[in-house]
Image (cartoon, rainbow, N blue to C red):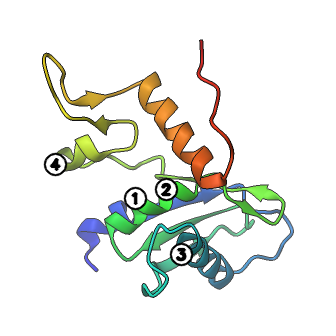
Amino acid sequence: MGQATRKDRRLYVGNLPIGAGLADKQLSEFVSTAMKQRGLIAQEAPDPVLSVWLSPEGTYAFVEFQSPDIANLALGLNGIMLLTSALRISRPNNYQVPVANAADAPGLVPQASGGGSTGVVTGEDAASRALAAAAALAGVGPMPTPA
């Protein structure tokens, strides 16, 4: 694994349950199992997590994945419940979208272009799609569309 892709392979995991005594190995196993259960990776796939750094307070962590693609898939776990806490899974605050992959970044959804379309949807439409995808992953019905 090269340092060049490390920033693309890391995700922030926040809102960890306070006082649970969670260890980095436990968080790694939880993420791996959750990705398999939700069909984000194949059941027979090797462990997607390369390493976990847990904050001293145990309230957040940084999880490093085997590849940038697996990290992108793991973003689909945002909101998953661990004990009594809904985890916040996102890119770290200092993450910058690589220029070559800007169209694949969360919040920018490529679409088939036609007519005068730019081929990229941003803003409320992308947010609505992300909420619908998260609801589908969580097994919740369709989310109401903002007026």
Q: Earlier in the sequence, mark 1 or mark 3?
A: 3
76 lies left or right of 59: left
The one of 91 and 45 positioned closer to us in this rendering: 45
Q: CA distance from mark 2 to mark 4?
A: 20 Å
Task: From this view, report whether residue 42 is shown above or below residue 115.
Answer: below
Residue on which disc 2 sits: 75
Amino acid type, residue under disc 4 in the picture: Ala
Residue on which disc 4 sits: 100
* Tag 3 near tag 4, CB within 8 Å: no
Residue furthest to the front in view is: 141
Which callout, 1 or 3, points to the residue nearer the camera?
Answer: 3
Answer few, some or many: residues within 10 Å of disc 2's Cα (few below 14, many 20 plus, some between 14 and 19): many
Q: Residue at x 67, y 41 (%)?
A: 141
78 lies left or right of 127: right
Q: Quadrant of residue 143?
A: top right
The one of 50 and 75 positioned closer to us in this rendering: 75
Q: CA distance from mark 4 to mark 1?
A: 15 Å
Residue 72 numbered tag: 1
Amino acid type, residue under disc 2 in the picture: Leu
Amino acid type, residue under disc 1 in the picture: Asn
- Quarter of the image with the C terminus is top right
The one of 63 and 94 positioned closer to us in this rendering: 63
